[in-house]
Image (cartoon, rainbow, N blue to C red):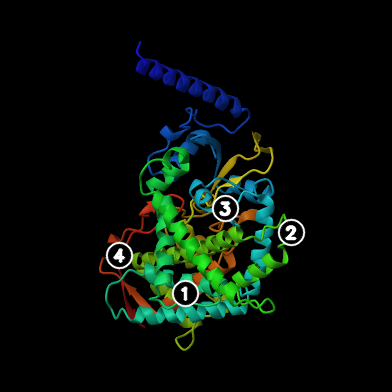
Amino acid sequence: MDITGSVTLTIVICISCLLFYSALKTRGRRGNLPPGPTPLPFLGNLLQLRRGELVESLIELSKTYGNVFTVYLGMRRVVVLKGYQSVKEALVNQADDFSGRGEVPTFDTAYKNYGVIFTNNMERWRQLRRFSLVTLRDFGMGKRGLEDRIKEETQHLISELRKTKGTMFNPSVHLSLASCNIISSIMFGDRFEYDDKELLSMIHVIHESFELISSVWGQMYEILPGLMKHLPGKHHQIFRDLEILIAIIEKRVEMSRRTLDPSSPRHYIDTFLIKMDKEKQNPDTEFTMPNLLCTAAQIFFAASDAPSITLTYGFLLMLRYPEIQERVQEEIGRVVGQNRTPNIQDKSEMPYTDAVIHEIQRFTDLAPFGAPRAVTRDILFQGYTIPKGTNVFAMLGTVLKDPECFSDPDNFNPKNFLDESGGFKKSDAFMPFSAGKRNCLGEGLARMELFLIFTTILQSFNLKSALPPEEIDITPNVTGMGNFPRFYNMYIESR
């Protein structure tokens, strides 16, 4: 046998041994885990997951293995929770046990475990979340000041929309500009003009990276990151985009540092810099520059993209169901009129509009399984043992479309949030912001933003499509970590 043959045989033997070892290790790990398909070494359950259809594949597996089951994404063990009862029991009833952050390989590669949202360092998460909640509240979140910021930015948005003068346009960019400026006013203390190159760059990289993470390329990276990082493909653009976003944040931090007055913080960045200075002698502090840059980038990412995508999807639904648009406009006219802009206090007198906005969030299912969780200790859950560190996919989309919780789960129907007398009906299964101790940091901001922008636009304009309503496609264009509406054009008529 020549040397080439010997080397080849050695490699084959080594690989076979590794596969055998991996199979034994995987089998030994199952123990009292929830049931699931038998994984292959290294690949896990890749063969049971349809290409680019991770969410649909997991739902399909639940039909065989139940509402709590185990899959392997490559070598990563994941317990999947389907439906309201399972998700509630985990995220609400056992909130501490399920408060860890699971792996998100794309974001983990980019942020390197820094920042408030994607860190699995529990002490880091506690300190940064507590600080962020207090600071965001101090700069307007949940107060009258935040409502004024949103209303002011909405008027800029209305002015931009009027410039379309009846021509066809895609509303996605306009809505992204507004959402980005609202969080910018909190994080940086000011807003951008709508033609500002830096603003447009941030919107582009945030939206592109989120859509790529949800695409086939992103899903493959989530399953096999060790392999995919060495292969060419669109997934590498995710990291370039996030590097651009962090660079822009870093530039803003430096601008704030040069003009900082410790006695008078102007925004989130100032407050974090002051905290950094106070704790510079603490070797265990989490208030460091990497955490500042990554926390700011993560908050900015979530607060700018999620509301704009939801509104973009929402206006597509108004085009598909013009009778619903008309009924919302009738309620706005009756409660608000045309002589003032809507206020957040109006919501209590607008049950139909409130139901429509909730139904938009429920139906669009922006984040089908939210951000992955991890269990913080060995736990017993529904008779199964889940080891510490196990990743958990709480499938929020299956909660939002649980037939035991909503009367018409598969269709867009505001009656899902209306009682028999036409009043607004709350639902504990309404979890677009997740639940428990790692629920969305900016839920209050998002709720206020959605109501004020949605109602102000429908107060000001009739939304029109060149297509007949029945020909408008409201199925997602991309489904993965996020659901994205199909590209569409519309035009507006002033009311």
User: Which callout, 1 or 2, points at the residue further toward the start of the chain?
Assistant: 2
Could you tell me which secondary element the residue under label 3 belongs to? loop
Viewer can see residue 191: yes
How far is mark 1 from mark 3, CA to CA?
29 Å
Q: Which residue is drawn at 52% across and 72% down?
A: 184
Dot 1 corresponds to which residue?
A: 453
Amino acid tagged 3: Phe
User: Which callout, 2 or 4, points at the residue further toward the start of the chain?
Assistant: 2
User: Which callout, 3 or 4, points at the residue further toward the start of the chain?
Assistant: 3
User: Which callout, 3 or 2, points at the residue further toward the start of the chain?
Assistant: 3
Looking at the rendered image, the disc whose residue lies closer to the viewer, 3 or 4, is 3
Dot 3 corresponds to which residue?
A: 118
How packed is label 2: few (under 14 Cα within 10 Å), some, or many (20 or more)?
A: few
Quarter of the N terminus within the rendering = top left
Looking at the rendered image, the disc whose residue lies closer to the viewer, 1 or 2, is 2
Residue 357, how many percent across, how many down? 48, 67
How packed is label 1: few (under 14 Cα within 10 Å), some, or many (20 or more)?
A: many
Dot 2 corresponds to which residue?
A: 282
Viewer can see residue 56: no
Could you tell me which secondary element the residue under label 2 belongs to? loop
Q: Residue 469 carries which label?
A: 4
Q: Residue furthest right?
A: 282
Amino acid tagged 4: Pro
Could you tell me which secondary element the residue under label 4 belongs to? helix
How far is mark 1 from mark 2, CA to CA?
43 Å
